[in-house]
Amino acid sequence: MSDVLVVSEHRRGDLRDVSLELLTAGRELADALDGDLHVAVVAGDVERFADELNRPGVDRIHAVENGEEFDHTVYAAAVEELAERVDPAAILTPNSVNGLDYAPAVAERLDVPLVADVLGFEYDAADGLTVTREMYGSKVETTVAVEGDRFCLTVRGGEFVPAEGVGDAEIGSVDVEAPESGARVKGFEEVGGGDVDIADADVLVSVGRGIGEEENLDLVEELADALGATLSSSRPIVDNGWLPKNRQVGQSGKVVTPDVYIAVGISGAVQHVAGMKGSDTIVAINTDPNAPIFDIADYGIVGDLFDVVPELVAEFE
Amino acid sequence: MKVLVTVKEVGEPDDDFEIEGTDIAASDLEYDLNEWDDYAVEAAVQLAEAGIADEVVAVTIGPVRAEETIRMALAKGADRAVRVWDDAFEGTFADVSSKVDVLEAVVDDEEPDLVLGGVQAADTAFGATGVALAERIGFEHAAVVNDLELDADAGVANVHRELEGGIEELTEVDLPAVLTVQTGLNEPRYASLRGIRQAQRKEIAVTELEDLGLSAADVESTLTLTEMYEPESESDAEIIEGDAGEAAGRLAEVLRDKGVDA
C-alpha cells in the first residue's frame, strides 16, 4: 500500500494540461512512498488519452470506458473501484471544478483525509505527509500535517511541470459499473461571446475590486481610451454585473496574452493570474504592497488608483 | 420545501497583518459572511420569495463571534439559524469529515430538501465540504453552480456548472441535493433596516456537539496546521516610486517604450 493513483481529466475530446502535471506530482510522491504510479482515465476516448498519458514514470494506466464526458457518478465509482484494486496510499486529482465535484465524495466514501488545493508536498516515513497550501486568498502559505498513511489530494494546476516523453506503462481496461447518475449533463454552453474579444487585444487595461463602485468605471474607461487599449476586468466586476462576462480575465473567463496588461485595483488572486500571466509586460497599480499581483508584475505602482489613473490619463492626452 | 444554507464567518486580512503562531492575529482580520455563502443565502431567500421554499434555515459552525454573521443571513431573509460550536473545535484545523459529521447531524434534525452553500470559504479555500456532505447524507450534488432553476414538481434542479475557460456545463440534478454556489449566481441583497430589526427576534439555536449526539472524538481532525508564513515574494517588479504625478510620468515613459500610444 504505497502506490499512487492519479486521476486524469479531459474535456470535450482534449486531455487537460493539469493531467500531465499530475503525472509529475504523482511520480514524486510515488518515489517518496517507494511505490508505483497508477493513472486512471475515465470516459471519452480512453485509448487515445491513455497513449497521451503514457509518459516516463507511469507504471500502469487504467482505462475506464464509460460515457463521453465527465459524470461525477461514474468518476466516483471508477476511482472507488480502482482504489479497491490498487489499494493506493494516495489519490491525486486535479483541483479543478470537476475534480472538486467527485474527489470529496471519493474521500468520504473511502474514509480518507482530503486536502484540497495542494501546491506541494513532502513525505517521509517518520513524519508522514506534509502538504503546502495557501489560505486567506493567497496572502499566506501554510503547511498542513496529514494524519495516517492514506490520503486524497486535489492538486492545483500550474504548480508541477507537465511530464514529457514517451513511457512504457502497462495499459489495461477496467469495467466499472456505475449506478444511474442523478446528475445528468445536458450539454455545454460557451459564455463570453459578444462585441469584443479581449484575447485579441494588444493592450489591456484591466480593472478589479479596487475600483469600489460602478460609477468609478468611467475612470478606467478613460484610461483605456487614452491608451488605445481594450477594457477587461477581474471576476468581481463581472459578478457585480458592471461589465459583461466577455470582459473577464481568469480561469473561468478568458486567458489573455497581450503585449501590455495594466492591472488596476486587482489584487491578483490565483484564478485571475492563471488568465494573464502570459502577458509580455504586466503593470500593476494597487494600494496593497503585499498584493500577489506584484509578484508577477514587471512594473508596479503602490498607490491609490484614484490618484494615479487620472495622472496617467493626463500623460497621454 | 425546506432549504438549509450553510454559512461561515471568515476573516479578511488587513493589508498589513501579523502572523501569530499558525494564524493571522485576530486584530488584523475583519470578520464577515463568506462571500460565496452570501450568494447561497440570496439563492435560498429567492426560492422562499418565489413560493418554492417554505422555510430557509441557516447553519454555521462557529464561535459566539460568528453570531453577527449569521444574524446577517437572518436579516437578509433566512427564517432561523443553527450555530454549532464546541470547545473541541477551539484552536483546531477542522478537516472536511469533521464538518460533515456536524452538518450530517443537523441535516438529520432539519430534514431539508435542498442544501445550498458557497463553493468555498475565503479563508481555508477547500471547496470540499458540500460534495462530501452530499455523499454522506445520500443527496445528489453539483459543485460550482452559477445558474439555478428549481423545478420542484419535477423534483430536479437545472443548473449550470461553471467550468474553466468560459465553458458552462448544463446539468439536471435530482432532488434532494447539495449545490455549491459560485459568486455571480445572483445579486446578493443588502440587509434592509427592517430585515436587521426582524433578525433580532429570529431564533439562533446554539448547539453543542452533545446536542447533536456527537462527541469531541468524532470531530478530531486528521489535519494539523503546522506553519503559516507570508510567501516569499518572487517579485522582480520595478516599483515606481514618487507621488502619483511622478509615478504616472515614469509609467507613461515605460508604456510608450513598449509601444503603447493612442
Image: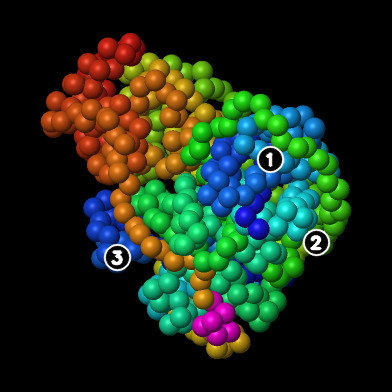
- Marks 1 & 2, CB-CB < 8 Å contact: no
Quadrant location of the N terminus of chain A?
bottom right
**Residue at x 65%, y 67% (from the top left corner):** A111
**Residue at x 83%, y 46% (from the top left corner):** A174
Disc 3, SS? loop
Residue segment shown in magenta = B214-219
Q: Position of residue B180 (x, y in %)?
A: 61, 57
- Residue B231 numbered tag: none
Q: Nearer the viewer, mark 1 or mark 3?
A: 1
User: Is residue A311 among what the camera can see?
Assistant: no
Q: Position of residue B139 (x, y in %)?
A: 73, 65
Residue at mark 1 to residue at mark 3: CA–CA distance: 42 Å
Give the amino acid type for the residue marked by disc 3 in the picture. Gly
Disc 1, SS? loop
Q: Position of residue A193 (x, y in %)?
A: 61, 27
Residue that mark 1 sits on: A59
Quadrant location of the C terminus of chain A?
top left
Residue that mark 3 sits on: B21
Residue that mark 2 sits on: B155
**Is residue B229 placed above or below B53 in the rendered structure?**
above
Disc 2, SS? loop
